[in-house]
Image (cartoon, rainbow, N blue to C red):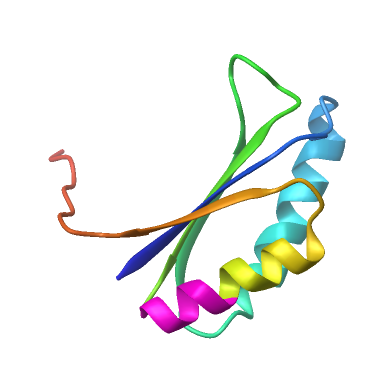
């Protein structure tokens, strides 16, 4: 699996506006080919920045998703990472 890691400025600092923006981003991303799971959130130190972590099933899907973001989101910084190891906490 592959993770696309994104950083974007101009995130609303108003909680309702930020939640609406993240919900929209999640809805659009869910329709991406190969989508597995995703997370969206604001930076704790710089609330105007947001971070996105999106897991996709293949490198081709990750590259296609990155291209889509780069073509449609101004100022986004996007990286692709191969997921080598996964760990979960125990309850």
Q: How many marks?
A: 0
| Residue name at image x 79 percent, y 29 percent | 15
In the displayed structure, does residue 33 sit left or right of residue 55?
Answer: right
Measured from the top left, where is residue 72 in percent x and y?
Answer: 80, 65
Report which quarter residue 60 is drawn in: bottom left
Magenta segment boundaries in residue numbering: 58-64
Nearest the eye: 42 or 3: 3
In the displayed structure, does residue 39 sit left or right of residue 27?
Answer: left
Residue 66 vertical placement versus 78 (above, below)? below
Q: Is residue 60 magenta?
A: yes
| Residue name at image x 66 percent, y 36 percent | 50
In which quadrant is the N terminus drawn? bottom left
Measured from the top left, where is residue 41 in percent x and y?
Answer: 60, 38
In the displayed structure, does residue 84 sit left or right of residue 28?
Answer: left
Magenta segment's dominant SS is helix
Q: Is residue 11 magenta?
A: no
Measured from the top left, where is residue 62 in percent x and y?
Answer: 47, 72
In which quadrant is the C terminus drawn? top left
Measured from the top left, where is residue 40 in percent x and y?
Answer: 59, 46
């Amino acid at each position: 699996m592959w993770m696309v890691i994104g950083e974007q400025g101009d995130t609303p600092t108003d909680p309702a506006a930020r939640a609406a923006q993240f919900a929209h981003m999640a809805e659009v991303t869910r329709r991406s080919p190969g989508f597995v799971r995703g997370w969206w959130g604001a930076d704790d130190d710089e609330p105007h920045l947001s971070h996105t972590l999106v897991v996709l099933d293949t490198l081709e899907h990750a590259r296609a998703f990155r291209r889509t973001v780069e073509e449609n989101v101004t100022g986004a910084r996007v990286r692709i990472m191969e997921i080598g190891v996964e760990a979960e906490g125990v309850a």
